[in-house]
Image (cartoon, helix red, strand yellow):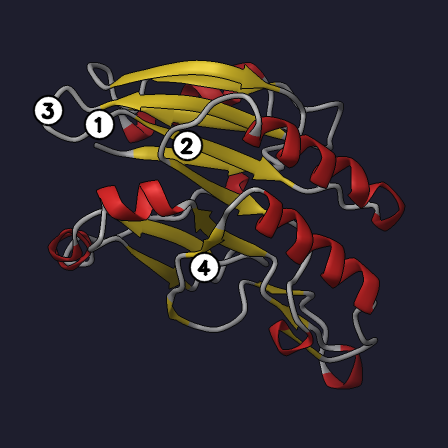
Amino acid sequence: MILVFLSETKASESKMKEFQQKLKLTQGIMVPSEGKSGGLAMIWKEGTDVRLKSCSNSHIDVVVHSGSSVSSWRATGFYGQPNTSKRHISWKLLNSLRKQCEMPWVVFGDFNEITQSEEKVGWMERDARQMREFRECLNNCDLTSLGFVGQRYTWCNGHLGEQRTLIRLDRMVANEEWRGLFPEAKVYHVAMFASDHCLLVLCLQRKVFSRLTKRRFLFEAMWS
């Protein structure tokens, strides 16, 4: 199965429908952008049993029914508040989602925050309180990092010299139950030259990614 989450789409519904047709992922949930900012989408191929739990301008929460020996599991696409003063709203939302049901759970997206200073290089130092509050939120939700293969940082501000900044803003985290369902799961950070963020690819089986990399991957300008 293929499940794609996009944040900050900045796209109209018609543009997103056109994009879905190109990828042949015709099913999904879209949270419209507000003018030229925001916008979320979770899309998948017709025939995949994905059911919406809830959504907002900061998240899309679904349950995936595999229809096989693997139990159903929960997937949440998440977008953290870009405004530092409102970051606590994101952690309140994530804690609220955690309390809604007990099942294998994976969360992915742009959290707009880091857990430790080593996840950022360049320009100003990250506030220690911000990082601590993010770590506490993940701990409270029983979510731990799935790790990654590839480049360390997922976002670059595009500047040169002293103001150049690299940060690991995007990540995938999961609870112990989900990790037990997919012990071979791997996260790959794939460089995207047309975007300031890199692409995160989660493969539930190790052999899947090697097949995907044999195909040419085309980046859509709207993703940036």
Residue bearing the label numbered 3:
68
Residue bearing the label numbered 4:
192
Q: In the image as oriented, which residue stretches furthest toward the right? A: 85
Q: Who's the residue at 76% across and 46% down the image?
A: 82
Q: CA distance from mark 2 to mark 4?
A: 24 Å
Within-10-Å neighbours for mark 3: few <14, some 14–19, many 20+: few
Of the image marks 2 and 4, the number of the one nearer the N terminus: 2
Amino acid carrying label 2: it is Ala
Q: Is residue 119 above or below residue 215?
A: below
Residue bearing the label numbered 2:
75
Residue situated in front as seen by the camera: 108 or 7 = 108
The image quadrant that residue 214 belongs to is: bottom left
Residue 70 percent coordinates (x, y): 16, 31
Residue bearing the label numbered 1:
71
Residue 121 percent coordinates (x, y): 67, 79
Q: Is residue 94 above or below residue 135?
A: above
Amino acid carrying label 4: it is Met
Of the image marks 4 and 3, the number of the one nearer the N terminus: 3
Q: Nearer the viewer, mark 4 or mark 3?
A: 3
The image quadrant that residue 153 belongs to is: bottom right
Q: Nearer the viewer, mark 2 or mark 1?
A: 1
Residue situated in front as seen by the camera: 153 or 85 = 85
Of the image marks 3 and 2, the number of the one nearer the N terminus: 3
Amino acid carrying label 1: it is Ser
Q: Nearer the viewer, mark 3 or mark 1?
A: 1
Amino acid carrying label 3: it is Ser
